[in-house]
Structure formats: C-alpha cells, structure tokens
Amino acid sequence: MEFPTIDFGWVGNGNLIGMMAVLHVMINHAVAIGGSVLMVSMEYAAFKRGNERLEAYARWLSKWILIITTTAGAMTGVGIWFTTTVILPNAIGSLLRIFHWAWFTEWLVFVSEVVLLLTYFYTWDRWKGEKKKLHLRTGLALCIMSWFTMVIITGILAAQINPGDWVETLSFWSAFLNTTWVPSTLFRTFAAITLGVAVLTPLNRWFVKDSLDRHIVLKLYGKWLVVSVPLMLASGWWYLKTLPDQAQTLVVWASGMSDFTFAFINVLGLLLMFVLGVMLMDGRTKYPVVLTVFTAAFSLLLITEFEIVRENIRKPYVIYNYMYANGVLKTDVERFRKDGALAQAKLSPIREVTEANKLQAGEELFRMQCIACHSIDGPRRSRVMTERAKGWSEEALASFIPQMHNIRPVMPPFAGTEEEVKALAAYIHKMVSERNGAE
C-alpha cells in the first residue's frame, strides 16, 4: 500500500517473476555450480594422468562457464531483483530488512566467486608445472564460493516458506536457521551436479574426440551422477517433511499434475538418470542418444518444476504467516477491513469508493491485491480472470470475494471494506465481460 503498483498486463506479474527465477536457477545450478564442479574434477583427472587433451577440454569449458555466468547468469540475477522490486516491493523490502547481513555477505561471496573464476580462466598458461596445484586449488575455491552463494540464498528462500518462530522473536537467526534450510541446500547441491552432468554429457559426442578421453570423462560424470541422484532424492524427501503441513498438501497441486502423473514422471525420470549414471560409470563411449537428450531435458524440467512448486506451496503467503502473496501483512487485514484498503494506499488517487469512481476504485484494488498472481487476460489460463470469472455475475463475485480464502485456502483474504468488495467485483465483471464479449 506504500508503493506504486505496476501491471505487466498480458504477461502477468507472477509469470514474469517465475520465468526470470527459473532461467536464473537453471544457469546458476547447471553452469556456475554443477559445471564448475565437473570442470575442476576434469582438470584434476587430466593432471593426474598428464593428459593435455583432457586439460584442453576443461579449459574450453572454463571459457563458456565464464561467459555464461558473467552475462546471462548476472543479467537474470539482476532481472530477479528488478522484477521482484517493482512487482512485490513490500516483500523484497521485508526480506532485505530481515536478511540485511546475509545479503551483504552473499554479495561479497559473489564478488569473490567472479574474481576466482577470472583468475582460474586467465592463469591456465601461466600456472604450469608446480604451480598447476595452485591452479587446481583456485578451481576448488571457485567451487566452494559458487556453492556458498547458493547456501546463503537458500537460507533466505527457505525462510520464506518456514521462518520458524521468527514471527514471534523477530530474530535473524530464527529465520535463517530454519528447519528447511539444510535439506533444501542439500537438494539444490545434488540437483546442480545432476544438472551439470545432464547438460554436459551430450556435448562429449562433439567436443571430446579421442575415445580414451571420452571414456575418462564419461566415467567421471557417471560417478557424480550415481552419487547425486539418490542423495537428491533423499534430501528432497527430507525437505518435504520439514515443510508446514499445509505446504506439504499443496506439492502435487502446485505442479499442476495428478497424483499418479506426478509420481510416475518424477520416479521414472530419476530412475532413467540413475541408469545413465551406471552406464557412464561402466566407461561406455557409445550410449543411447535419446537417453542423454532425455536426461538433459528432464533435469532442466525437474529444476523448473521444483521452483514452480516452491513458489506455489507458500500460498497464500509470500513470507509464511507474516505477509500474504499480495504484499498485505497478516496483521493488517482486519484494520483494512475496518478502515478501508484505499485509505491506506498512499499513492492511490482514490481514497474511498463512490458511485462515480466505483470502477476506477475497483481497478486500484485489483492492482493492489490481485495482480501479484492474477491478470485480466494472459497465457496462463488458470490465473486469468477471463477464465476464472467467466460467466460470473457481479453479485456472485461480490459474494465470493470475502469468502475466497475459505473456499480456496491458497488465496489471501481480501483486505477491504464491503464497498471496496463491491467495487472490485464491478471492475472484474466489467473487464471479463468486455474481453469475453470481444471474443
């Protein structure tokens, strides 16, 4: 209520944040963490064997890891800050206040990660002979810093869904050392390595020409995959059990799949990834192309599914038991119902509802309390009003809005007066009628 509202229209505010976050996580996990671990492992294998061709391949990987993480990775990271700040300023502002020193530490770690990556890449030729060990230690330090960045961010993300007793204590440590932090960190760690293997395995067909080199690389990938897949599954199960009860019940719903489809796809996919790991460990230089392509695609879809589920199971909150998904504090709902939401909105041109401004007031209320998740029209049909409210009368909407959080527990309660409920209902009905009528 203290910030201007920005509506990205057809794209959808929630969709924009989700797309940016998923893209960033793919790059960060698969390249910055998983790719770095595999790259340094490969350099170590080349060093032990005195294999210059294998070292050249590790060096080639370091070039692309540097390019991707400092361009697409950095830009999508900034993109997350931009989209969350303009769409949910209350939420990002609260997280910055709660985790100020965690964010500060993470920025220092990230700078260290970039410096190490640059050092690692530009010293391939300079650190030879005895200095080769220093180059390997730099690579190890890079892997640790890349991972440590994720450790800090995961603590903050985990606190959004299970902040422990922070709501009562307001202690930084109560929020950061929440029960979901360790299992979710472990899950992301093994998922990142799995992603790295899945994405890099198909590349070996084109970029590792010598059959003996390919044998070494694939065996290395297989070892990482055989270890990571079971541990990812175990830590994922542990993470699930640390979630609040309501969040646990929403996992399958959040994926958009049926119970059977959800279990079948995830179990089968993980099993096939494990099978690929066993095949790679066997040292085969020839393996089914379909399996490697499937593994690459499935691993990317798996991390996408995880991010979508993680976002949706928090509902109706953005910070569990503290702030609703629309940025309204849980403690402010009753006050807004009594005094009005518009009266608290400092930047709204409408302060109270009248017959003359009813539709304009409804639009303001929709922007303040709905657009974080919903739009009038757009690509995600389950979230657009043209589908959700199609065929509803204005009176039916006005009756539903005050009870929507009871009927659909994933929705925040409407925080406003009876007049504001009617204004919102009138605006939604008008917009939906116009859009559907135009069709």
Image: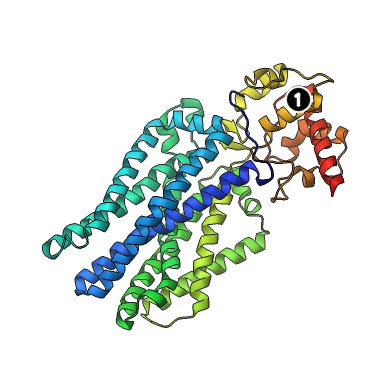
419 versus 42 height, above or below? above
112 versus 281 height, above or below? above
Q: Residue at x 46, y 70 (%)?
A: 274
Horizontal side of 15 relative to 81 (left or right) equals right
Location of the N terminus (image quadrant): top right
Q: Which quarter of the figure has residue 269? A: bottom right
The number of discs equals 1
Q: How is the image coloured?
A: rainbow
Q: Residue at x 69, y 50 (%)?
A: 380
Q: Which residue is disc 1 drawn over? A: 361
Q: Residue at x 39, y 65 (%)?
A: 227
* Residue 158 in view of the camera: no
In front here: 193 or 56? Answer: 56
Horizontal side of 170 relative to 330 (left or right) equals left
In front here: 218 or 408? Answer: 218
Residue type indicated by callout 1: Ala
In percent of width and height, residue 85 lies at 53, 35
174 versus 137 height, above or below? above
Horizontal side of 241 relative to 5 (left or right) equals left
* Residue 406 in view of the camera: yes
Horizontal side of 155 relative to 119 (left or right) equals right
Q: Residue at x 81, y 44 (%)?
A: 435
In percent of width and height, residue 213 lies at 30, 78
In front here: 397 or 238? Answer: 397
In percent of width and height, residue 100 lies at 40, 31
Q: Pointer 1: residues within 10 angstroms few (<14), some, or many (20+)? A: many
View extreme (left): residue? 130
In percent of width and height, residue 165 lies at 48, 32
Q: Secondary structure at mark 1?
A: helix
39 versus 214 height, above or below? above
